[in-house]
Image (cartoon, helix red, strand yellow):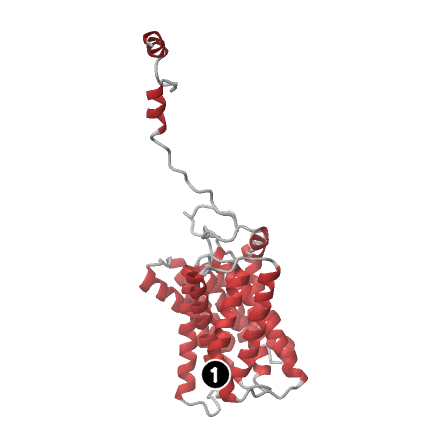
Amino acid sequence: MSLQSQPQPPGPATPAAGALAGARVPAGLLGVAFVILWSTGFPAARIGLDHSAPFTLLVLRFGGAGLIFAVLTQLSRAAWPPARAALHSAVVGALSLALQLGTLYLAAARGVNVGLIALVIGTMPIVTALLGLAFFGEAVRPLQWLGFGLGFTGVALAVGERIGPGHGAGPGAYLAVLVGLLAISAGTLYQKRHGSDVDPRSALALQHLAATLLLLPFAVHEGFRIDSSAAFYVTLGWAIGVNSLGAFALFFVLLRRGAVNQVAALFFLMPPVTALIDYLVLGDALTLYKMAGLALAALGVWLATRPHPGARPHTAGQLQPPVVPARRTAEPQRAASGSSPLVPSALRMKKRRSS
């Protein structure tokens, strides 16, 4: 896996912010950690929805993570973004958190097969590339399209055996899955273009708190339904500590350091890795199709994230020094004053004698 680092927008200059942005950690290692941590959210959601209503679970998760990020921001004295940047962070929270996970949790709670959800969300890199091409003119290389095709084939192999008819799911539940796909794709593009040039701690606090406020009325409508079991609190703690504080923070850092299509391609690995986690944690069968899907998805991600042959190398996490234009007015001023080395010495001596 190779995530090519791109020049980053100006961000906070504090050492702590630079460390949090992963300046010294290879992008490939960050990508591996991101895939593993994000993938654990799927079995965690399966367990959590057995003990809680969907919006109640998300409000508690987002609210808890938002408060922790806010405390980290205050303790580290990180900068809060100005009003315009704060609004961008709130939009990212609305798309990537509230709308995406809200619709997917609702679809799962309404009976949509989780294999089908994983297959639809597995097209996220392709949808993101198409949106970027249509709205922002972001080019996609032929090798990346090949990687996208192989990655999606791997996703289909990994989750194909789990796809089946939903239990009582209506058209609205399936529509919710498509809305979730568009939300994570649009949110990824929006964050890269407008929401990555602020401190990650304060930005993630605003994202999670905005998502909390948006989903709060739905949780109230559900009556904040939980069963107060140990399994619920363990799942909630995992969702806050691992999925929000860990996975979404890495997602922020990767978007800040890499190209959108390269980061999005990592989502091809989510369903196969989730199948592996389900085998280790929940005891689901690990079939030959799932193993083949994992291998094919990994090949697709490797192709989609390979650096462009003509791209200039860039040190991860390091801003390129700005190019300062030459001051063309300096030499004429020096010449006028007689101090320029370009003025012949005889001319300078003539000026002295005349004075």
Which quadrant of the figure has residue 86?
bottom left
Element type at marker 1? helix
Figure label count? 1
User: In the displayed structure, would residue 90 be above or below residue 103?
Assistant: above
Q: Residue at x 47, y 46 (%)?
A: 313
Which residue is nearer to you in this view: 92 or 291?
92
Answer yes or no: is residue 147 visible: no
Q: Is residue 257 left or right of residue 355?
A: right
Q: Position of residue 222 (x, y in %)?
A: 51, 88
Q: Is residue 68 left or right of residue 165?
A: right
User: In the displayed structure, would residue 158 be above or below residue 28?
Assistant: below
Q: Residue at x 55, y 62 (%)?
A: 201
Which residue is nearer to you in this view: 225 or 117?
225
Query: Farthest right residue?
Result: 230
User: In the displayed structure, would residue 89 be above or below residue 110?
Assistant: above
Q: Position of residue 181 (x, y in %)?
A: 42, 74
Looking at the picture, which amino acid does disc 1 mark?
Answer: Pro
Q: Position of residue 120 (x, y in %)?
A: 44, 76
Query: Farthest top residue?
Result: 353
Q: Residue at x 36, y 23 (%)?
A: 334
Which residue is nearer to you in this view: 341 or 110?
341
Which quadrant of the figure has residue 345?
top left
Image quarter where the C terminus lies is top left
Q: Position of residue 166 (x, y in %)?
A: 47, 88
Query: Farthest bottom residue?
Result: 168
Answer yes or no: is residue 13 visible: yes
In the picture of the structure, the residue carrying the numbered disc 1 is 217
Mark 1 surroundings within 10 Å by alpha-carbon count, few (fewer than 14), some (14 through 19), many (20 or more): some
Which residue is nearer to you in this view: 103 or 118?
103
